[in-house]
Image (cartoon, coloured by chain):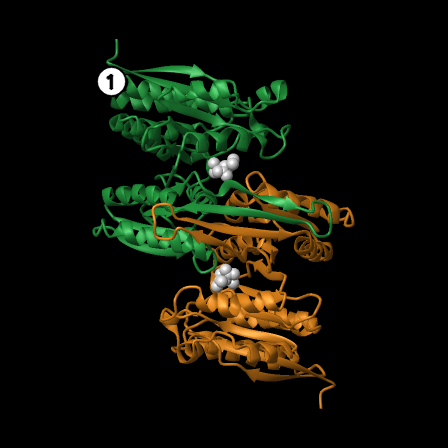
Chain colours: A orange, B green
Amino acid sequence: MAARTVKLAVIPGDGIGPEVVAEGLKVLETAIAPHDLAVETTEYELGAKLWHRTGETLPDSVEQELAGHDAVFLGAVGDPSVPSGVLERGLLLRLRFDFDHYVNLRPVRLYPGVESPLAGVTPEDIDMLVVREGTEGPYAGAGGVLRKGTPYEIATQDSVNTRFGVERVVRYAFAKAAERPRKKLTLVHKDNVLTYAGELWQRTVREVGAEYPQVAVDYCHVDAASMFFVNQPARFDVVVTDNLFGDIITDIGAAVTGGIGLAASGNINPDNTFPSMFEPVHGSAPDIAGQGKADPTATVLSAALMLDHLGVPEAARRIEAAVSADLKSRGHGVRSTSRIGDDLAARVAEQG
Amino acid sequence: MAARTVKLAVIPGDGIGPEVVAEGLKVLETAIAPHDLAVETTEYELGAKLWHRTGETLPDSVEQELAGHDAVFLGAVGDPSVPSGVLERGLLLRLRFDFDHYVNLRPVRLYPGVESPLAGVTPEDIDMLVVREGTEGPYAGAGGVLRKGTPYEIATQDSVNTRFGVERVVRYAFAKAAERPRKKLTLVHKDNVLTYAGELWQRTVREVGAEYPQVAVDYCHVDAASMFFVNQPARFDVVVTDNLFGDIITDIGAAVTGGIGLAASGNINPDNTFPSMFEPVHGSAPDIAGQGKADPTATVLSAALMLDHLGVPEAARRIEAAVSADLKSRGHGVRSTSRIGDDLAARVAEQG
Ligand SMILES: CC(C)[C@H](C(=O)O)[C@@H](O)C(=O)O
Ligand SMILES: CC(C)[C@H](C(=O)O)[C@@H](O)C(=O)O
């Protein structure tokens, strides 16, 4: 029997979610095999089907069960049959907020062999870590509507930023930057327009930065950063930013590194007061669901982020090495979802 | 004497502003020569220098004078010696708001001969018109700070969206889409998270769209749109979006079409209750100011947008044709700012 058992809640979700999650778990199992560790999974059927059957997105009792796990592994939620936002807010964002996932960690790396839509860039040019705040900003849900349906209607949408919330994610970002060879941290915001929130972010970065003299600090407006992600990605090492700006720039990051099919993310509660949640950045892609066409790589890389969080970095590095080798040797041949998973698992095992 | 005289307020501004504005005016004069039209310019010294001397960004009396003109032509404002946001808000945004520039018009076109950072894209792939709302959203300046400097500090930043404000810009966008060959309008928002504002935008597009059955309507979340601007730009024809999303995606648009040096913009008051304002999207670039190194093309293209607005579309088309020819014939030789202006003016004159 393994010395340690990780209790993993699995939410396959909708569309391609179940397919990619199966491969993620397959590779995960192979990666931990050499370690004195077992993973015990419990599957939760949440997503469009549950919503259609019961009108619920996340029953309180299920959330409580999830909270008792060491981590959550999620495929994708969302279906055209469900109104936009219902599952996103009722399940994904609810878990991010209730489980206090204040770090939304999104590596942006161009793997060797992967074709970037950018001409002439090399893997050396794109290797960043975006630390997106996950529990406040415009995602807080604050706002309202007055005089709906009249010519005098007004809809507000409020971004909520607290020193507490900003400081903890900024601290996390500095710690990450200090660990990396370049030791550079860029704050992305829009402080020339969003003055209240921008000033708080700037001041917090300045103050926390005083404790990290070895980290070089830079600032970039979100519009300029969005441009630089395309034409000067090498500017960035670690990026820290708010919830909405992070949502946008990490999709640009995914685009320039070969697409959303490779982008991994971790919704992390660094204090471990609740389980962290790991998921590919892509959605449920209902158009290709059930056909074995989805690339499980983003999910597999999310499993690596999970292993880092669970304290098994050697296993995480083996997964990354396997992905790296697989991507480098990809031709134009088409492999099925499970075949890619098998190949990745085999490469992980080789390194075992 | 010309039958009609256009009174143009010119704000050269800071950094490279005066250099590029001079070339913009040079080309403008050449373009209107065949028409029964004269341009009478009045220069206003606003920007960093005035602020250092007087602490003012836009004296009320000057704003009143500006209001008496037919249009405003602006180079760039901003200098590292002035705190971030002071000139942007005190001058640029103040004019956009006070002069009710509710349409911020930003064409995103890849000109033949221009190298895009994207591999393999052609001018046919990127030809869109972004209609950015200019007078509300997160730019309204609403928000505040509580308990500043304490661990309990909270900063809010509110996006204000009105039916009045959204409807008028959506109407403008539909009218533009109906004029174009593809007749496609994409709303870019984030309605799965920013539910109050998003629903208002969606509903308004749906309702106004009923009057434009010939226009195909699409919707895209801002994160996905930011990705598609990079890897599927051909998806877009006319894009309508809020003030902040428009700020971000037009910089991505500038990046994929060869950089901010070519991106033009018009801050338009379609009702002509106040003068519209035309400016390049780029900033004051203090690092290269005064060296004759700046590319005036974005400013020249902004002059073309101004001529469209002033009802001289033939002159606008001649400028665009001149820019197109110039860009196509550019080698790696370096020309000065004024040389590019001379060359563009000569090309415009040839077509005269
Ligand atoms: C699905 C949506 C709510 C989500 C977000 O906006 O955070 C997604 O875009 C992401 O980036 O994980
Ligand atoms: C300078 C700044 C206030 C401005 C904006 O945010 O609108 C600029 O980025 C732009 O796009 O014109």
Left or right position of B285 against B332: right
Quarter of the figure that contains the C terminus of chain A? bottom right
Residue B195 spot, x, y in % from top left: 45, 57
Left or right position of B319 against A213: left
Farthest residue to the front: give it.
A147
On the image, which quarter does residue B68 sit in?
Answer: top left
- Say if A48 sits above or below A212 in the image: below
Residue type at mark 1: give it. Answer: Pro
Residue A266 in sight: no
Mark 1 crowd level (few <14, some 14–19, many ≥20, 10 Å Cα): few
- Say if A313 sits above or below A218 in the image: below
Q: Which residue is mark 1?
A: B34
Farthest residue to the bottom: give it.
A1
Q: Residue at x 25, y 12 (%)?
A: B2
Q: Nearer the viewer, residue A334 or A298?
A: A298
Q: Chain of mark 1?
A: B
Residue A253 spot, x, y in % from top left: 52, 55
Farthest residue to the left: give it.
B214
